[in-house]
Image: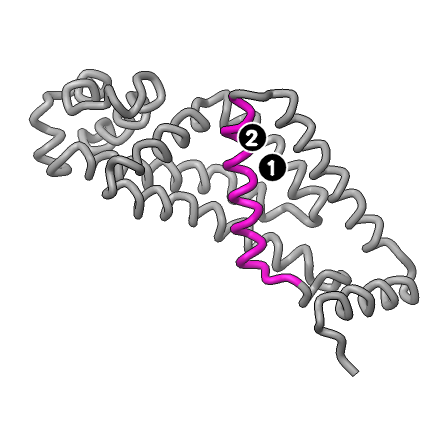
Amino acid sequence: METREKLLAGALRTLVEQGITKTSARAIAATAGVNQALVFYHFGSVDELLAEACRYGAEQRVARHRERLAAVGSLTELLAFGRTLHEEERAAGHVAFLGQLLAGAQAHPRLVPATAAGLDLWITEIERVLVRVLAGTPFAGLTDPAALARAVGASFVGLELYEGVDPEGAEAAFTALEQLGALMAAVEELNPVARKAVTYTLRRQSGRTRP
C-alpha cells in the first residue's frame, strides 16, 4: 500500500476509533504507521486529509456494493438491500465514521463538501435503482427519482445514527419501511384494470391527471 493510501485508511480508522476531536496529524500518522510530516506533505492539512478520506471511503464502499445494487429489481428488494447494508456498515464501523464526519462538519467547514460528495455517491446509485424499479409501475411519473433518492438516503443516515440511542425504535422503523414496500409491491401485482384505476387516482391526487 502506498503512503497516501496508508494515510487515507489511517484517517478513516482514527476517526472511528478516537473520534473527530482526537483525530490529529500525530494520531493519524501513528495509526497509518508513517511519519507525521507525511500528512502535510501529501495533503497539506489534517482537514484536507479528512476530506479526501471521506471521498475515498465512500468510493470504496459504493464500488463494493454497486453490483448488488444493479441486481435490485423491485422496491422490496431495495429495502432488503438497505437493511443488509445497514448491518454491514455498522459492523464495519462505517456508521461511527459517518457520525463523526457529520459532527465534524459543523466545526470544520472544509469537511462539508467532501461529506456531501460522499453521500451523493450513494444517492446517485439509489436514484439509478429507483428509475429502473419504478418504470412501468403506477408510481412512475408521480415521483421525482432524484428527490426520492435523497429522501431515501437521508432516512437511511438518520436511522443509522438513531439506532445508536434507540435500537428498538430503529428496528420498528425498518419494519415499517418493509411493510410499505410490501404494500407498493401488492399494488404492482394488481390486474391491468385495477392498476389503471390506482394510477388514475394517484395522478389525480398529485394533480397530474391527464385527459
Are the residues flagged by discs 1 and 2 in contact, CB closer than 8 Å?
Answer: yes
Residue 73 vertical position relative to residue 158 in the rendered view, above or below:
below
Q: Quadrant of the C terminus?
A: bottom right
Number of labels in the image equals 2
Q: Quadrant of the N terminus?
A: top left
Cα–Cα span, label 1 and label 2? 6 Å
Neighbour class for label 1 at 10 Å: few (<14), some, many (≥20)?
some
Q: Which residues are magenta?
A: 143-164
Q: Main secondary structure of the magenta part?
A: helix
Identified by mark 2, the residue type is His
Residue on which the image places disc 1 = 82
Give the secondary structure at mark 2. Answer: helix
Residue 189 vertical position relative to residue 206 in the rendered view, above or below:
above
Residue 161 coordinates in the image, percent (x, y): 50, 29
- Picture residue at 39% right of the left edge, 39% below the top: 58
Residue on which the image places disc 2 = 86
The front one of 177 and 91 is 177
Residue 120 vertical position relative to residue 132 in the rendered view, above or below:
above
Give the secondary structure at mark 1. Answer: helix
Residue 160 coordinates in the image, percent (x, y): 52, 30
Identified by mark 1, the residue type is Gly
